[in-house]
Image: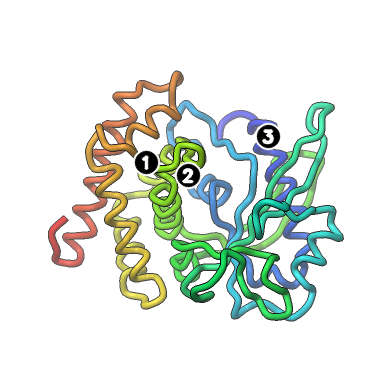
Amino acid sequence: MPGAPEPEYALARKVLLDALEALGDQREAVVLVGAQAIYLHTGDADLAVAPYTTDGDVALDPGRLRDDPKLAEALREAGFVADPEHVGTWIKSRPLEGRPVEVKIDPMVPEAVEGPGRRGARLGPHGNKAARKARGLEATLVDQQRKRIESLADEDARVFDVAVAGPSALLVAKLHKISERVDSPGRRDDKDALDVLRILRAVPIEVLAEGTGVLLDEEISAQVTEEAHSFLRDLFSEPSRVGCQMAARAAAPLESGDTIAASCAFLTQDLLDAVSSARGTNA
């Protein structure tokens, strides 16, 4: 990744490390997801728009959670405060260029291993407000690899070895997020679509297709992966589709909107064709 990271991104990584440090032995149940995980796989993905995020997302595998330390207690002791408006969101304020900046950490549990019910994830001794449920993260329990997560600031020497969702799982999760919010302008974030393009550009299509096939063959991830495959087709398969246009807006003015939209559609069709060919179906 050329050049220094954006200050807000470096701060988001520092707060993510704060959370990982606070969780202690519970790190064995953590899978890094979201933009910070995507950038570990893609770097700048040959885009003029630098990787950028102001928060941190982690998936939790309930089967790996220990009774102690308690998630909420550990985060509070590390200076995090529960967001009163959003269950499962934790906020920490840290200084940046002489001003306090709030960074959010979102622990989430895949819906398939949590079952129906309210937004908060029911985690036994950890209660039902420490994390929230999210559909689409099921794939991260299948497609993951351990990586070293380190600071983006020279003065911070902390390093943690944790599971990071693989690119195919991250694509599934990101497509679910976009689909869930695409009809809600107040919640929609064009940057999510640009993150889809980062994955499509940086990861070889055959690698994504192979990963998708693995996810389709696993019971826990098959349905959400099929849904994501449909979302990809509906949102990104033509330059005029809403996902392509979101990515184009997110890249402006540093990149040509027409070029970004066309790139989204071309790579999307490549992936759809590769998955269909591998499984003997029609795209």
Q: Which quarter shows the N terminus?
A: top right
- Give the number of the mark in front: 1 or 3: 3
Q: Please tell me in which quadrant of the rendered image residue 122 appears.
A: bottom right
Single out the residue that lies furthest toward the top: 253
- Nearest the viewer among 32 and 41 is 32
Give the percent coordinates (x, y) of residue 105: 67, 52
Tag 2 and tag 1, C-beta contact below 8 Å? yes
- Which tag, 2 or 1, sits closer to the chain's start? 2
Q: Position of residue 3 (x, y in %)?
A: 61, 28
Is residue 268 positioned above or below 82 on the image? above
Residue beneath disc 1: 201
Tell me which corner region of the image, top left, top right, bottom left or bottom right, holds residue 57: bottom right
Residue that sits furthest to the right in the current view: 77
Q: Quadrant of the C terminus?
A: bottom left
How many marks are shown on the rendered structure?
3
The alpha-carbon separation of the residues under discs 2 and 1 comes to 8 Å
Q: What number is the disc on residue 8?
A: 3
Q: How far apart are the alpha carbons under marks 2 and 3? A: 19 Å
- On the picture, is 52 further left or further right than 249? right
x 71%, y 59%: residue? 160
Question: Mark 1 is on which residue type?
Answer: Arg
Q: Is residue 280 left or right of residue 119?
A: left
**Residue 40 spot, x, y in % from top left:** 55, 48
Q: For residue 42, which numbered disc appears in the image? A: 2
Q: Earlier in the sequence, mark 2 or mark 3?
A: 3
> CB atoms at circles 1 and 3 under 8 Å apart?
no
- Report the residue at 34% width, 32% height from top: 245
In the structure shown, which secondary structural element does the residue marked by tag 3 occupy?
helix
